[in-house]
Image: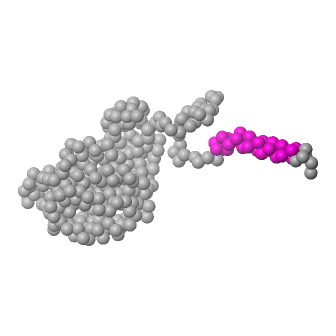
Amino acid sequence: MTTRKVSLLLASVVLAVSGSLAEEKVKSPADQAQTGPQPKVAIEPRTKKGQEAPSPQQGRAANIRVDSTLVLIPVTVTDPLNRFVTGLDKDYFRIHEDNVEQTITQFSSEDAPLSVGLVFDASGSMSNKLGKARQAAAQFFKIANPEDEFFLVQFNDRAELMVPFTHNTEEIQNRLTFTQAKGRTALLDAVYLAIHQMKKAKNPRKAILVLSDGGDNSSRYTESEIRNLVREADVQIYAMGIFEPIASRGRTAEELSGPSLLSEIAEQTGGRHFPIENVNELPDVAAKIGIELRNQYVLGYAPTNLARDGKYRRVRVKVNQPKGYPQLRAFYRMGYYAPTQ
């Protein structure tokens, strides 16, 4: 083969490769637009019909900056006998933010995976209640789904993360088996630690279950600080308050304030407080909380107030009374803090 023929052959190969790359370069953005991963949530397109499509540079900027907020509110609906009401659709709910009605754009009533933190009281005042408290935890775990994850925070004089997030509930129950009741009660510190740990949760639905007699006499954090913290956190708190009968209660100021403290912390988040005077009721109440978490509606909306001022927005949910039903009641998160950026 002559030198001239070799040169012509190499030139044709280079031209063929260059043409192929150029063709790929032209097709790539279109191909990505058609075959790239689609978002799970429907988002209203920015460009209206007839407008030019955004340039690739504009598309990249839109992927980085988020201009809207989706607020999700878990809601539990009960009848006068405290039974759960299921089977309602979106039209039965209305939601207001700071007295302005919002449009519900997302609605779900499926049993979605949960991330749950168990906050377990091991202070000296729990010495004759530990056995039933362990049984309550075991009963709660029986309702768990394989996708659920759990962690354990235990407290007496101080709060400690005993088991980080795990799918293995037996690991937590084995740890509780060796728990001994002693020391004072750092309940508020334990709630703080649990909310901090919940930042590592993998599931969008999050809940904290508190098992305690409610009195606090050893925390570094104050009630005011914890109130503000739970209002900011996207976590539902359920509490099982194990109290002495009213006739024998009140030996200390902490024991007197225990029920109201747990109620306030729980209700701020859309959870509930179940006061218990008979420890034999603990397992049944724990199972009830587990079932409640499995029978919630989740309402989502994009707030009409777009100000990123970091202020607290109050939320109110109303259930449109279905015909033939007794008066229904809704439990839900009472508000949230707007973003600042």
Which of the image's four quarters has the C terminus?
top left
Q: Is residue 144 left or right of residue 212?
A: right
Q: Nearer the viewer, residue 145 or 202?
A: 202
Residue lying at the far right of the rendered structure? 2
Residue shown at 37%/59% (left/top)? 165
Tell which of 13 and 141 is nearer to you. Answer: 13
Q: Is residue 25 magenta?
A: yes
Can see residue 280?
no
For the point 92% across and 51% down, the residue is 1
Render colour scheme: one colour
Q: Which residues are magenta?
A: 7-34
Could you tell me residue 65's position as x and y percent?
49, 36
Q: Would residue 50 be found to the left or right of residue 61 on screen?
A: right
Q: Is residue 297 left or right of residue 153?
A: right
Picture residue at 35% right of the left edge, 69% below the top: 170
Task: Provide residue 259's location: percent of width, then percent of height.
Answer: 18, 53
Q: Quadrant of residue 283?
A: bottom left
Vertical placement of residue 301 versus 236, above or below? above
Task: Note whether 58 is above or below 205 in the view shown.
Answer: above
Residue pushed farthest front?
Answer: 3
Percent position of residue 33, x then y: 63, 42
Decide: is 336 above or below 113. above
The reply to whether the magenta stretch includes residue 246 is no
User: Residue placed farthest to the top in the image?
Assistant: 51
| Near-viewer residue (106 or 18) | 18
